[in-house]
Every structure is written in C-alpha cells, then in structure tokens.
Image: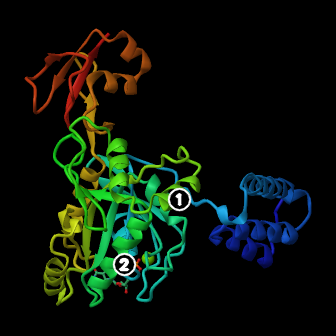
Amino acid sequence: MPANLTPDYHAAERRFREAETPDAKLAALHEMMATIPKHKGTEKMQGDIKRRIAKLKQASERKSGAARQKPFWHVEREGAGQIVLLGPPNSGKSAILRELSRAEPEVADFPFTTRVPLPGMVSYENVQIQLLDLPPLAPGRTPPWIRGLVKAADAVLVVLDLGSDELLDQTEGLLAEIDGYRVDLYPVQGGPEVPQAIVTATGQVSAPATEAAPAAEAGAARRQVLAQDEDEVRAEDEDEDEDDAGAAPRALKPAAVVGAKCDDADAVFRLELLRESLAGSPLLRLPLVEVSTLDGRGLDKLRRRMFELLEIIRVYTRAPGKKPDFETPFVLPRGSTVIEAASQVHKDFARDLKFARVWGAKVFDGQMVPRDHILQDGDVIEFHV
Ligand SMILES: Nc1nc2c(ncn2[C@@H]2O[C@H](COP(=O)(O)OP(=O)(O)O)[C@@H](O)[C@H]2O)c(=O)[nH]1
Ligand SMILES: [Mg+2]
C-alpha cells in the first residue's frame, strides 16, 4: 500500500536527518509522528518512529542533565580505515572528497556549506579507504560532536587553504580547536614502531615513550605533560563516560597536512610565509601534500598518503599449488604476524597452523617462517595446517 507521505512529513524527516543534537532529533521525530498519514500502509513506519523516540528518551534519561549531550554522529567504518578531513571553512574539503570518491558533497564559495558528516570511499590500488567530510573547524562555531568523530577515526587530514590570505590565522585557530579536542597528531613513520614525535598545538613535542610502549601509554604520558590545570583535566575526563573516569587519555592520531588550492597564484608565497611564521611548530613535522582539485595536482599522492596514514599492510593468501588472489587483500595493522593473519583468514587456521611459507620483499621465495614472523605489505602467505 502506498504511504502517501505529505510535504510536511518530508520536511520533518529532513529536519530529523539534519538535526545536530538529540533534542532536535527528538523534536523532529515527534513532528514526523504528528504529520505521518495514519493508515495501514504507514503502520510499520509509525512503529519505527515510536521506537526511535523511545530510544532517544531512554538515552537522555540515562544522562544526568541536558548539559551532558554526547556527540551522537557515528559513521560506520567501511573499507580499510576511516580518515577525517579537518579544516577551516571554505578550504576545499568537500571538493577533495568529491574528486577522490563518488560522494557528491556540496561545494560552494561560501562558508559552512557542509553541516553533517558525509563519507565517501576512496580507491587506492586494491583497497578502499573511507574519507569523511566534516563541517569546518572555526573557533566558537564548531559543532561539539565533531570531536567524537575525530576520536573515532583512524587518521586525520588537516586541510589548509593555500588560496586564502587568512592562511596563518586559520591554521592557528585550527590547531587550537584540535588541541581542544584533546587530540594529538603525529606523522607516520616507515615502520610499525610507535610514533617518533607527537604533535600538539601548544608547540610541545615529546619523544616517543619507548620503542615498545603502546600508543595509549604514549597518550597518557602526553596528557601529563599538557595538564596545566589538573582539576580542569579531571573535570573533562568525568564528562566522558566512554573512557574510564579520571583516566581518559588524549587521543593520538596519525596525520598529514593537505595544502589545498595549490593552483592559486600566491600559494607558494603563502606556504613560505606559513613555514616562517610557524617555524618550530610541530605542525610542520607532518608530511604535506599539495593538491588542486582544479587541475588534479597531488591527488594521486594524496591517495597514497591516505593509505600510509592507516598504518596497514595488505597480505594475500594462496592455497598450496594455486595462484594467489591479488584482488582481495587481507588488511592488517602494520607489525602483524603470521598467526594474526591466520586468525583473520579463519579461526581454525590459527589453531591448527603447522607452518607457513611467505613470498615477499623481505623473505626468500616460499621461505618457511615461524608463527611470530612479522609480515610486510604485499606478502603472499601459504598456510599449512
Ligand atoms: N582555486 C581552487 N579553488 C578551489 C579548489 N578546491 C575548491 N575550491 C573552491 O573553494 C571553495 C570552497 O570549496 P569547498 O570544497 O566547498 O570547501 P569546504 O568548505 O572546505 O568544504 C569553492 O568555491 C571551490 O570551488 C582548488 O583546488 N583550487
Ligand atoms: Mg564543505
């Protein structure tokens, strides 16, 4: 039976999709309920709306007060990893997403065109990487939920507008915003080790904790360095119930800088000025990719950079005596071992594995390797069970 939805209903539904707070979502849902034609054909939809209302109410009752609204945008990770675009208004973020993926964000020459997160899939060789376009970061005008999305992402692309005379101010504002999220950015190195240097907007760079320290520990160490006002830090921690109260570490994200609109006649000059003005700033330790969506410059390099930011490797399996399948890699974190690859392929493989042979850059062809052998990007593995 056709639902015969009215324009009022569609408008309410749109408000629901664009709502930026749970309260706004709830209000829009009530409107949807009020405007939906009540007949047999919409019974299922009515039930669905009621369920969403109940769920949102429950969630808000669980919170102690309206002030504790959590970021509620969550974009399901797809592909080999998720990378967010962070940049000031009008810097060309949406244009980059549009060029690299099939997503169709609005690109416009006025600020704040992008209001909600929009994902697109970017191909790099045989993997797909999810790129997330976000509303701009502008001091005082950044929706609070962006922080949750940044923390949930695997990596960050900091977009700077080489076409703007405000480049320096914008960059400083951007760094302050990112620091306010308690997110530290670091450049990805060649190997599986922990970051060499950790970047913060306050200009401090800490040495790696130790070779073996997991990233979370390094984050905790950073927090100690940065905690100028312990009470303030604690208050923030308590506000964040997804983390252990009082122990919320600063998040560490691999990052690169995108110099957007490098086709601009003054781009080189502005970049030079930025480098001088920010001399010594940890931001300059992040790798820079200059791109133009007008003439396509740098876009391939950016895809490669995105892959590197994810700190992943691709391995391929082959059955004994057969050809490997290079179309569909298994994607693993850098530093993964043979046994970790085996358990991703099949849990029985990990249990029953007798030995494995590996073909690749760092081994002889078909070399027999132990279970804890560390794999490289591009390795082909033959499991023997
Ligand atoms: N010259 C030049 N202009 C660009 C480039 N990319 C985007 N723009 C323009 O910059 C403006 C803002 O772009 P948009 O992608 O909407 O920026 P966002 O607000 O960061 O998402 C638009 O007018 C675009 O046409 C580029 O590579 N070169
Ligand atoms: Mg945009």
Horizontal relation, residue 349 to residue 356: left or right: right
Within the image, what quadrant is residue 321 found in?
A: top left
Total labels: the figure holds: 2
Residue nearest the viewer, comparing 143 with 376: 143
* Residue 303, x across and y down, in percent: 26, 59
Q: Residue furthest right?
A: 39
* Residue 281, x across and y down, in percent: 21, 69
| Image position of 268 with respect to 151: above or below | below
**Label pair 1/2, CB-CB below 8 angstroms:** no
Within the image, what quadrant is residue 39 found in?
A: bottom right
State the quadrant of the N terminus.
bottom right
- Decide: few, some or many residues near mark 2? Use Cα within 10 Å; few <14, some 14-19, many ≥20: some
Cα separation, mark 1 vs mark 2, equals: 21 Å
* Residue 73, x across and y down, in percent: 57, 60
- Residue at position x 27%, y 23% from top? 338
The residue under label 1 is 236
State the quadrant of the C terminus.
top left
Residue nearest the viewer, comparing 55 with 109: 55
Residue 173, numbered label: 2
Horizontal relation, residue 6 to residue 280: left or right: right
SS for tag 1? helix
Residue 330, numbered label: none
Residue nearest the viewer, comparing 246 with 216: 246
